[in-house]
Image (cartoon, rainbow, N blue to C red):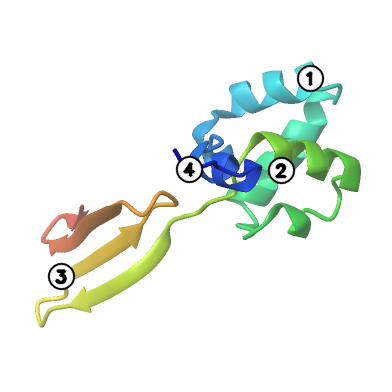
Amino acid sequence: MAATSKKDQENTEMKPSIYSLTRDQLIDWAIAHGEKKFRATQIWDWLYKKRVQSFEEMTNISKDFIAVLKENFDFNPLKQRIVQESADGTIKYLFELPDGMLIETVLMRQHYGLSV
């Protein structure tokens, strides 16, 4: 039987995505980890208004709390792999999840607007 390193074990144990929390869950989590409610609001704004790509870009969050976030969550937005557009304006996207699984979705233009 082959031995596994700690790094191998860490790679197989996925942390939840920070994006998996609702705003209220993020508030509860931050409070449970010694922060005030406003800190969760700041994080939420970084994620959904400023659309940062890493915890380190959250410049008004302390480095210590960034470390706590990184210990508890993955920051793993979808990776866009392929985009195909047809003549009628339909766009097909292929996204990759952090675990390597793929998601395909299609954005279709309809007379009433867009449909996914």
SS of the residue under disc 3:
loop
Type of residue at label 3? Answer: Thr
Q: 108 or 35: which is nearer to us?
A: 35
Q: Earlier in the sequence, mark 1 or mark 3?
A: 1
Pair 1/3: label in front? 1
Type of residue at label 1? Answer: Ile
Answer whether residue 61 is visible to the viewer in this image.
yes
Residue depicted at 65% across the width and 27% down the height: 26
Residue underneath mark 3 = 90
Residue depicted at 12% across the width and 79% down the height: 86
Q: Are marks 1 and 2 in contact (CB under 8 Å)?
A: no
Q: Earlier in the sequence, mark 4 or mark 1?
A: 4
The image shows residue 64, relative to residue 78, as above or below, that is above
Report how far apart the C-alphas of labels 4 and 1 lie in the structure. 42 Å
Residue underneath mark 1 = 31
Residue depicted at 10% across the width and 82% down the height: 87
Q: Earlier in the sequence, mark 4 or mark 3?
A: 4
Q: Earlier in the sequence, mark 2 or mark 3?
A: 2
SS of the residue under disc 1:
helix
Q: 109 or 42: which is nearer to us?
A: 42
Residue underneath mark 4 = 2
